[in-house]
């Protein structure tokens, strides 16, 4: 381990995308109490530095205990809030209080809401950024037309966190975000584990001596998409992190691109995004 707690073989520039969000982060949805604390601590020991949470997860205080004692500058903490909760500022203040932090690295609107004026909220978030309470602002589960609304109102969104994996290869959204300097972060990158059963990932994995999960994560990272992974075992957390020592051949990238079936694993009332 080097002085920053990252494995020596993993260079910082390989783990960080655009010198902002780490390419791989730990998702904490459904983690709470001792399980949350131990999992986050384990991930930190393995080199993870991006911790993804949300007000609705109700685990901020557990995460605060887990990250206590870690150099704040090494960490990248993301939290999210719903538009039907408190205002952006109130939500941010609550998150900071519960996490025992002075600022958030990334603050996201959790979901679009047809009943709420998103542009107004995003402008409130810009004020939080100017005041140093958050370093980057963003959204989650936003489609192109949601993003375009923000752009048309001169709002720079830093990141959009969406479900993204080979079964849900949102190519147009990916290209739009690249064209407008919006970083993409993928949640459920392994599709609840269903994707790793796909035979093609086993075949490609054999070629590189990597697991199916590592192949999928690398496919995303080579598209400059950061990933948020879940895992409670040291083996899985370690496996997910060891993806910086190889590159997928363009032919293999193309094969994976062709697996798209527009399949979502996150089923909600918002899944059709018709607003």
Image: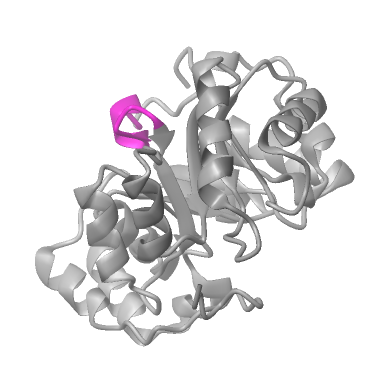
- Left or right of residue 272: residue 133: right
Give the residue displayed 74% in from the left and 54% down from the top. Answer: 84
- Left or right of residue 79: residue 264: left
Give the residue displayed 28% in from the left and 79% down from the top. Answer: 203
Residue 126 location in percent, x, y? 50, 29
Give the residue displayed 71% in from the left and 55% down from the top. Answer: 29
Give the residue displayed 11% in from the left and 72% down from the top. Answer: 251
- Left or right of residue 202: residue 68: right
Which residues are the magenta region? Answer: 10-20
Residues 250 and 116: in front is 116
The colour mode here is one colour
| Residue 17 magenta-highlighted | yes
Residue 190 location in percent, x, y? 49, 68
Residues 212 and 17: in front is 17
How many discs appear? Answer: 0
On screen, 9 above or below 193?
above
Residues 10 and 273: in front is 273
Residue 268 location in percent, x, y? 65, 76
> Does residue 238 show up?
no
| Residue 12 magenta-highlighted | yes
Q: Residue furthest right?
A: 33
> Does residue 45 show up?
yes
Residue 87 location in percent, x, y? 72, 39
On screen, 82 above or below 6?
below
Residues 220 and 275: in front is 275
């Amino acid at each position: 381990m080097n002085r920053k707690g990252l494995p020596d073989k993993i260079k910082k520039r390989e783990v960080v995308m655009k010198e902002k969000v780490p390419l791989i982060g730990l998702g904490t949805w459904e983690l709470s109490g001792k399980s949350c604390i131990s999992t986050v601590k384990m991930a930190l020991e393995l080199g993870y530095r991006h911790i993804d949470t949300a007000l609705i997860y109700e685990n901020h205080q557990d995460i605060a205990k887990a990250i206590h004692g870690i150099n704040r500058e090494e960490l990248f903490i993301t939290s999210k809030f719903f538009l039907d909760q408190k205002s952006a500022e109130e939500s941010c203040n609550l998150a900071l209080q519960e996490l025992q932090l002075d600022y958030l690295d990334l603050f996201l609107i959790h979901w679009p809401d047809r009943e709420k004026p998103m542009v107004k909220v995003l402008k409130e978030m810009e004020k939080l950024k100017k005041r140093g309470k958050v370093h980057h602002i963003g959204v989650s589960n936003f489609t192109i037309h949601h993003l375009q609304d923000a752009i048309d109102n001169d709002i720079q969104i830093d990141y959009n966190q969406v479900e993204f994996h080979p079964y849900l290869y949102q190519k147009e959204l990916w290209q739009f975000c690249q064209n407008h300097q919006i970083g993409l972060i993928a949640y459920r990158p392994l599709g609840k584990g269903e994707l790793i059963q796909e035979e093609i990932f086993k075949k490609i994995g054999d070629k590189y001596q990597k697991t199916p999960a590592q192949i999928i994560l690398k496919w995303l990272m080579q598209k400059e998409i950061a990933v948020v992974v879940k895992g409670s075992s040291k083996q899985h957390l370690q496996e997910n992190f060891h993806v910086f020592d190889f590159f997928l051949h363009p032919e293999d990238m193309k094969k994976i691109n062709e697996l798209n079936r527009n399949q979502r694993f996150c089923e909600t009332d918002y899944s059709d995004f018709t607003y």
